[in-house]
Image (cartoon, helix red, strand yellow):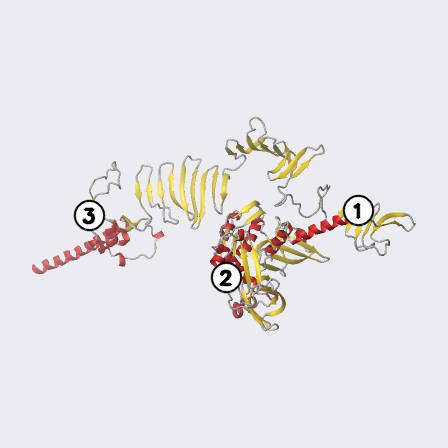
Amino acid sequence: MLKLLNGQDNPVLNIDNFYIDELWSGLDELVFDIPITDPAYKSILEEAVVEYEQPYLVKAIDGGSSTAKVKCQLNVDAFREAMYLSYTNESDTVAGTIEKVLPAGWMIIDHAHITSRRTIELEAATPLEIIQECEDTYGIIVRYDVKAKQLHIWDPDSFSPIGAFASRDLNLKEVNYKGKSSDFATRLYGYGKDDLSVASINGGKPYVENFTYSDKVISAYWKDERYTVQENLLADMKRKLKEMSVPSVSYSCSVLDLAKTNPELYGHQNFELMQVVKLVDDIKGQCLNHQVVQYRRYPFYPEKNEITLSTVAPSIQTSVKNLQSQIEKPSSTFRQIMQAIIDNTAASIAGFDGGNMLITQNTEGKPNGIMIMDTDSKETAKKVLWFNLNGMAYSKNGANGPFSSVWSFEQGGFIADWIVAGSLLADRIHGGTLSLGGKNNGDGVCKIYDSNGAEVGSFSLDGIRATKGKIGGWTVEQNDIVNDTNAYKVYLGNGTNENKDFIVLELKKSDGSKVYPFWLRASGQLGINLVDQSSSVPAITIGNSDGGYMQMGADGFEVHFNGDSGDHYAKMYYSKDGWARLTLGSYGEEKARIDSDGMIQTRYGKKGSATPNVHINSAGTILECGSSSRRYKHDESTDLGELDPRKLYKLPVKTYKYNDDYLSEDDPRHGQTFIGFIAEDVQSAYEPAVDYDDDGKPESWNSRVIVPALLKLVQEQNERLKELEEWKNEIISANHG
């Protein structure tokens, strides 16, 4: 069921008839209906979190007389927090580009493995908008796993048919067909920056061709100034023409999801987003592969599932971007039409040489307004300007309207299809988005003045500046900020003499006394005071537990790093009893320890054992040890098998000296002759007793292996001596019998 995360009781919504739209854009939607009498309905507000498998944000509530339709969108607010005022990826791969703007804690799962490099340049873009630009530029789609903080990159062109199909005879309940070929082309001429052409790497041809659908030559032109590399331009020309060379066809299908209702029999009919499905259209006589571009999924009613199939992947971002480009580009058709309207309107006003005026009257025959018309009759006039004490209205559809522009004097409101202003004064602006500056209008600045005309604040590229007034629940006092409860105060370098070079947080306790838990000096000194805190609570934490962190508290200091092999850490802590300890560990296990009394221990390779491998006690004695308890061993046997110690008979005992570059001259072993084993000889004779270095080369021999083997030989020799002694006694007894 759905769960409403409202920060309180997190009630479960008793609703199962909901659906999830899995969208090509990755911004999936969850939609459900709820009775307005449901006790939980009052808690469903815009931006509230509704959870099913993933968290969704409530974006629209359409309430009716009995039920309300609630529309939610996947919660990707983490990708909307940052803002890049001027962004460029400096020609990078798609994974490299997205990696640079990932929110903290998120990771990329790259299924596409696209190595081509492209250039992306954006102004005032969030990470989400940069990723959407990547989808268009690299031809990929992105899926968000918000719970796991994973961003999945997919190449939709890499999907091949897997046997799933849709037909009226099997699983199609309803089919809606849409097709168009307005952008159809089989030959594409493409150019990049400075008229970059692909002719030199494309057999002398500045174009590419695709006759998969038709053998007609239909040419089209495409230019993108971002391309500076011929190979990249050629690759994307082919990708673009692949879409253009086939008519755009889409099917909105109500499909019986057989894989969900009967997985044993129809498991191969499992529909997923991006999957290539063969659609059998018996009416149009077509059997073509299409891609699933939208999947409407009813988790509890799979028989209601719907899919949308298309030959061309949707690209909403591209459409929006092209529209914006048309608006901003001075030479665009849109801007030319706008300018023509402005010019014609100005000419008509300047050249107006006469007209007709009518004084209108009320039912009592008294004047109540003036009407200016394009004819001498109210009945025949088309263009009419009518004004009185209530306001002014304009119509180009006659005196009875409808009116396209209205100005109310009493309400102070002006409504028009277009408003063009050099300066605009307003008491209030409701709704929409207020944009300042921009690409073609320079840097935007918003200034705020008090009643005396003094500037008290501003918003600009330099940031937010305020010299007085309020920010949320805080009051600005010159360079200090004071909370309205008067319980908190932040000094920003303008406090008392002792605090003027500080950033200081001041807190007032219930008894009226002041404490200062945080300060930052101009010299760079950072102070965090553990006032009224338990000694177990860390004073400073840098980083987070997902990617590694450093933590310092009242009882010590520790550093953690979470790598592929698990958590690795170093800790230094102490007790009130007067001892201190440094520990190193990984995989949740302590591996080494140094105590303040001089004791050193290592536990490499052990899990759950308190016995160290190497022990240096407080007296300086080095002990190599290991646990020999049956608690840590299994598969005991006296049959040595491959560990037959008689192999040691072939191990040569040699004398040797250490190389001069191995030991320093002050080492007592320097230049001395020793008796012992060579590690390579041990490897040949009795390999289990060899210790290897990190490169896999023989480094030393292990006495814990050789000594038990030698003992086994001694035991065997002892048994043999006993047998010989008994045999000798038998012979002596027989001879003297």
Point out which mark residue 654 bears: 3
Disc 3 versus disc 1: nearer the observer: 1
Point out which mark residue 627 bears: none
Front residue (pair 582, 109) = 109
Of labels 2 and 3, earlier in sequence is 2
Report crowding for label 2: few under 14, some 14 to 19, many 20 or more residues within 10 A (C-alpha).
few
What distance separates the C-alpha of mark 3 from that of mark 1? 111 Å
What distance separates the C-alpha of mark 1 from that of mark 2? 60 Å
Residue at image mark 1: 408
Of labels 1 and 2, earlier in sequence is 2
Residue at image mark 2: 158
Of labels 3 and 1, earlier in sequence is 1
What distance separates the C-alpha of mark 2 from that of mark 3? 64 Å
Q: Are marks 3 and 1 in contact (CB under 8 Å)?
A: no
Amino acid residing under circle 3: Lys
- Image quarter (top left, top right, bottom left or bottom right) of the C terminus: bottom left
Front residue (pair 288, 609) = 288
Amino acid residing under circle 2: Ser
Amino acid residing under circle 1: Ser
